[in-house]
Amino acid sequence: MKPVAADMWRRVLDLDRPALLAEARRRTRLEDFAEDETFDAGFRLLIRSYEAESHLNLIGRVFTRQNTLRLLTSRLRLVDDRRRHPRIADGEVRRPLFLTGIAGSGATRLHDLLAQDPDNRAPLHWEVALPSPPPRGRSDDANRRIAAAEGHLRWLAGLQPRMRRVRRLEARLPEECSVITSYSFASFAFQEAHDVPTYDAWLESLDLTGSYAWHRALLQQLQLRARRARWVLSAPAHLFGLRALFATYPDASVVFIHRDPVEATRAVAGFTAIHRRTFSSAAEPATVAREVTERWATAMSRACRFRDSCAAPAGRFLDVHYEDLLRDPLETIGRVYAHWGVPLTDAARSRIRRFPASARGACPSPGSAVDPEWVDERYRWYRERFAVASRRVEWPSSSGS
């Protein structure tokens, strides 16, 4: 883009913090963001990183501005919902199950399978993206929100046709917790589409208690008008937040899913590079691969230190392997249910069997950007601790990965 045109679009698609806050207030006719230190610092740093580090192209600027306004307007409405419906804050979130692992480890596949059990509740994309007012079952309002979410996903798929090779996007599929915590503006969701190193450095050093408070608030919002169910939740970012997770949900259980880190890195690095190239004029696959390797190796190391500290009972953690999930899903899921202390019913087994094995999962993106030897060295300790064998697949090189 020519400098004059770029400057014009910067002015038209302004990412100025006061202007965005004012626009969100104008759209909703609401004032209260429930501002706190986390929101204030996170929002400021995120906008600064967008402008100074993300190299936004025109599409990126449009997407970023729209997404930021969506989060701000939804946050205003969520705060207002809690004012108008005091019962939201009284809702109990009992014994939730969290799935985590390094990004690309296969937790999405396990999450999808567990969501087939009618007694489990996974937050769905449409209700996380459009959570206000509290959803009311199969209503006309819910159908309108589903249609709106599907329309947005189709727009994204049109911008990123290669994305369909590595991720299935549907409004009624389970959503990751990083999207939930994005309303706090302290979330690991933003790095997926943008290079935001200044924001990342702040986030990785942050006490994430405020972020998990918003996580709990959204679950309370979604369950207000629904029958009580067992929450099943998933995100790699829980590796960074175990201390805050257990402070928020003292009765939680956590399942770690383990996979060959080279294959996991190929999956997430390929996806991230495709995503960023849509919105940025500078997104090098090799740089992305090194970034995600460092981030998730650091996250796993931090999570293991928390486990070793005995700050949460060892019995709250279960380790499973991605290869076992692929080989025998029901046996692996049976282990998860036994750990969780809930029955795996015949109805749940039947629905899990019918769920397509290829529906979603951590699919490596072909390409040579990932250096297997370097990833192996970074994760040597991880392989040894959790007996993670190499399941190397040689993928053809592709400069677009």
Image (cartoon, helix red, strand yellow):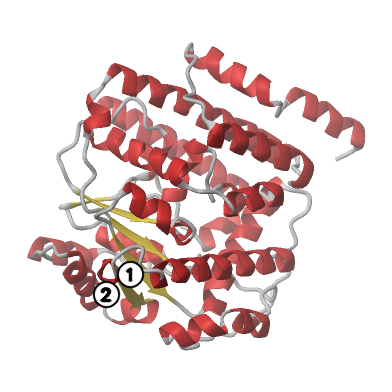
Judge whether 373 appears above or below 206 on screen.
Answer: below
Residue 387 screen position, x and y as percent: 42, 87
Specify the amino acid type for callout 2. Answer: Pro
State left or right for residue 9 relative to residue 264.
right
Q: Which mark is residue 36?
A: none
Residue 316 screen position, x and y as percent: 27, 66
Residue at the spot 41% in from the left edge and 22% down from the top edge: 77
Nearer to us in this view, 117 or 320: 320
Please report contact status of discs 2 and 1: CB closer than 8 Å, yes or no: yes
SS at mark 1 in the image:
loop
Residue at which label 2 appears: 329
Gap in angstroms between the C-alphas marked 2 and 1: 9 Å
Q: Which mark is residue 357?
A: 1
Q: Quadrant of residue 3?
A: top right
State left or right for residue 272 relative to residue 383.
right
Nearer to us in this view, 352 or 114: 114
Residue at the spot 52% in from the left edge and 72% down from the top edge: 264
The quarter of the image holding the N terminus is top right
Specify the amino acid type for callout 1. Answer: Ala
Residue 53 screen position, x and y as percent: 76, 46
